[in-house]
Amino acid sequence: MMPEDARGKSAVVIGAGPAGLTAAYELARLDLLPTVLEQSNTVGGLARTESYRGFHFDVGGHRFFTKVEEITKLWHEALGEDFIRRPRLSRIYYRRRFFHYPLRPMDSLRGLGAWQGCRILLSYLKWQIFPYVREDTFEHWVTNRFGRRLFLTFFKTYTEKVWGIPCSELKAEWAAQRIKDLSLRVLLLRFLGKSKRTIRTLVDEFHYPKMGPGMMWQAIRNSVESRGGVVRLNTEAVRVLRDGNRVTAVVVRNAGQEEQIVGAHVLSSMPVSELVQRIDPPAPPSVVAAAGRLRYRDFMGVGLIVNRSHLFPDNWIYVHDPEVRVGRIQNFKNWSPDMVPDPGKSSLGLEYFCTEGDDLWRAADRDLIELAKRELERIGLAKAAEVEDGCVFRVAKAYPMYDASYREALSIVREFVDGLVNLQTIGRNGLHRYNNQDHAMLTGLLAARNVAHGTRHDLWNVNVDDEYQEEVVAKDEGGAAAALVTTHTVR
């Protein structure tokens, strides 16, 4: 049994991803006793690193960039010299051409041609005169700001690959969160040097752990444990016990055995839909039903080892071509050379967005590797024969969906969860909000301070009003290098 005085200082953290580990790190720093429960065999959650034959594969491509100074400080403290600066290059593959991403006006014009460029401009002017009166969907929001032709060219195909639903069903909130305050007008004004904000560049380099993001989360785990916290792997939270509006314990399962973990507070980064379903006694039927309406998009990475030292200069490429199923391609050697143990080879991550149980999700690993090899050759990045080996990793519930019913369902779920006085939900899935890892970390940081200091930080509003464009402002340079931040932010 835990001593009574220690029990009052204890907290149970469900999930060892960026939000959960940051919460535990802050709790331990404030002399509290966190116990972190992670159902998988490694830390990092959606930001973990997979390894195969000594090659390291980042699950999704996680740039370490933030405007939150405390997060920057934490990253540097955790890794020191192993937190390296890397140059950034990303492009879009569309109609057998590559376009710089973020988009550059002259580069796009050269790739599309003058006639297509004129049509895009005329389409934009039309939608400025006759816009959608209501912006309910992603399609409405983007069309009003960029015109329908640019929406169809650079937004529709990729966005529908990611989400698996038409842009007419994806809610406008997602666009407003990811493309805040940008439009074709802003892009053109910056290009002409007429913008009130002059932009030197859009983040052309970033920080990165030299062995992938998992290195960061292992370092933070070590820090938590050095301060007396506990991180338990292969330990699933199967029930969350409550007495009225207070959580009393978390029932966990490890190696087939169940036990209760007691804590004065519980911080959960598991999908909030699953959390509701594991509450015991159960939540009201209306809340359980609402949780069941929250949907997710899943993710699959196919890691390929290519027998060539250099393939292409990009860190990653967005694939807008509807004739292939791959959505994004990561070149890990360009993220960090240390992730590739043999300098004569390269390693790639081909990303497929899917839904758990569909044909991609259920496909055999060998078939997925063959698909990735064929599509890599079709795009022209490498020959299938140059691929010597591969592996597959699947990530369930990677993207909370902003579909037609999510807003009402989440409102019902949130009201119930907020009524549990010693429970806080954190992170991307805990809040059902498409946050980047730095914002997920911030929710964990603030939740820990709510526990330690009795503050009332509203975690649901993290990254609601924050401007998150990747801009570096300069006072004396024109805006010709300004780029368009669209919907493709790497997590």
Image (cartoon, rainbow, N blue to C red):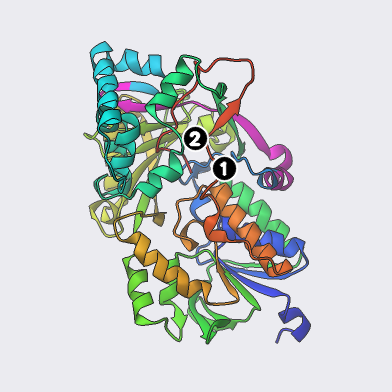
The one of 454 and 3 positioned closer to us in this rendering: 454
User: Please, is residue 126 above or below residue 228 in the view?
Assistant: above
User: Please, is residue 234 above or below residue 303 in the view?
Assistant: below
The one of 202 and 98 positioned closer to us in this rendering: 202
On the question of residue 426 being in view, the answer is: yes
Q: Quadrant of residue 422?
A: bottom right
Choose the circle earlier in sequence order: 2 or 1: 1
Q: Which residue is at 64% across, 59% downward? A: 446
The one of 392 and 420 positioned closer to us in this rendering: 420
Q: Which residue is at 52% across, 18% downward? A: 479
Count of labels in the image: 2
Do callouts 2 and 1 mark residues in contact (Cβ within 8 Å)?
yes
Question: Start and end of the magenta stretch?
Answer: 73-97
Q: Quadrant of residue 262?
A: bottom right
Residue 340 is left or right of residue 402, and the answer is right
Residue 55 is left or right of residue 183, and the answer is right
Q: Position of residue 29 (x, y in %)?
A: 76, 61
The one of 214 and 452 positioned closer to us in this rendering: 452
Packing grade of label 1 (10 A; few <14, some 14-19, many >=20) is many
Residue 8 is left or right of residue 185, and the answer is right
> Which residue in the protein does label 2 denote?
332
- Amino acid carrying label 2: it is Phe
- Amino acid carrying label 1: it is Gly
> Which residue in the protein does label 1 denote?
212
User: Please, is residue 204 above or below residue 390 in the view?
Assistant: above
Q: Position of residue 190 (x, y in %)?
A: 48, 20
